[in-house]
Image (cartoon, grey):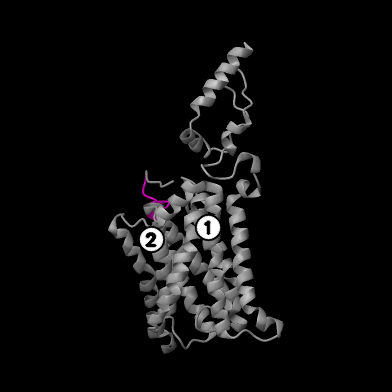
Amino acid sequence: MERCEKKVCKKEKQALTQPALLEMYDYPTLLPFQPFSSGGWCGYDAMRPEIMPAQGALSNNDATLLVRHPVATYFALTFTISWVGALLVAAPHLMRGEPLPKMTGILMFPAMLLGPSITGVVWTRIVDGKDGVRDLFSRMFHWRFPTHWYAALLIPPILVLTVLLILKTFVSSSYAPNLFLMGLLFGVPAGYLEEIGWMGYAFPKMRSQNNALAPSILLGLLWSAWHLPVIDYLGTATPHGAYWLPFFLTFTAAMTAIRVLISWTYSNTNSVLLAQLLHMSSTGALVIFSAPRLAAGQEATWYGLYAATLWFVVAVVVKIFSKRLTAKGTFHA
């Protein structure tokens, strides 16, 4: 009987090819030791599906907090790298007890971009192996999808201009939109580098087949909090002074809604490239068109109205696509 069970175990082990193991790796709740139909138990620890890594990833013997919590550790390292980078830029002024010049605040942002991008690539290599890195870069160059999805890139600039023109007409001429075309230079690096991590690594691991809405909202809140070191240097009415908190709250509302829309386009196209472009469109529209002569309170007001219009669009999207954010029967793993 014992010899028979060993033969069964040997056959089962041979049947577990690499593709089969990779498929099984998606189901971490399986028991540590799996009973076979023969009634015996095989104690091949190395074949346990919940801890079998992808090709080139960490081995079972080196299982760490990273492997057990790949999303939480990603955010922890991303925030650490970004915030330490911002601190290093600001350190000379802080050590002298000086207020930060606006240019220093602006220069803190490029240092922060290293966090989500570098961590996204490195964590993909560690957690998902070489195949994961190839898949990440494939999604970053994926542009062949139905062309109507490119129309989503128009949402941020249309809404920004609409809100500012309404406020200019009915509230104050101070809300007249600007046309600072150099603002595009702010959007390109932010969109390209950040989305390597946010949508290339984190979001696919956070969502489920039946719910992409809640993970996208959580990601939006985390994304907004990630901006904290430079929040007083975003917008045109900087520093925000007594209106720092109202501005941060309205900024968070707007960015979380944008993150849901980015997640919506990604879920239907599996394109990190489109996520990068929509992020560029969002940041670029805010820098290019933001009214240049607003008081801090006025800026918080228009950000709040902009956030409300974005959430209206999100509500329409959820009504049509449900909390999956995809057409019925469509899911990109």
- Residue sticking out furthest to the top: 1
The image shows residue 163 at horizontal and vertical percentages of 40, 77
Q: Which one is nearer the viewer's eye here, 239 or 93? A: 93
Q: Quadrant of residue 156?
A: bottom left
Of 321 and 29, nearer the camera is 29
Q: Position of residue 108 (x, y in %)?
A: 57, 76
Identify which amino acid the numbered label 1 is placed on: Gly
Relative side of 297 to 263, left or right: right
**Amino acid type at mark 2:** Leu
Query: Residue 143 falls in which quadrant of the image?
Result: bottom left
The residue that disc 2 covers is 274
Q: Is residue 139 magenta?
A: no
Q: Quadrant of the N terminus?
A: top right
Q: Which residues are magenta?
A: 319-328
Location of residue 121 with respect to 234 vertically, above or below: above
18 and 40: which is toward the camera: 18
Q: Determine the main secondary structure of the stretch shown in magenta.
A: loop
Q: Which mark is residue 18?
A: none
Query: Could you tell me which residue is drawn at 38 percent across and 60 percent down?
Result: 274
User: Pointer 1: what residue?
Assistant: 120
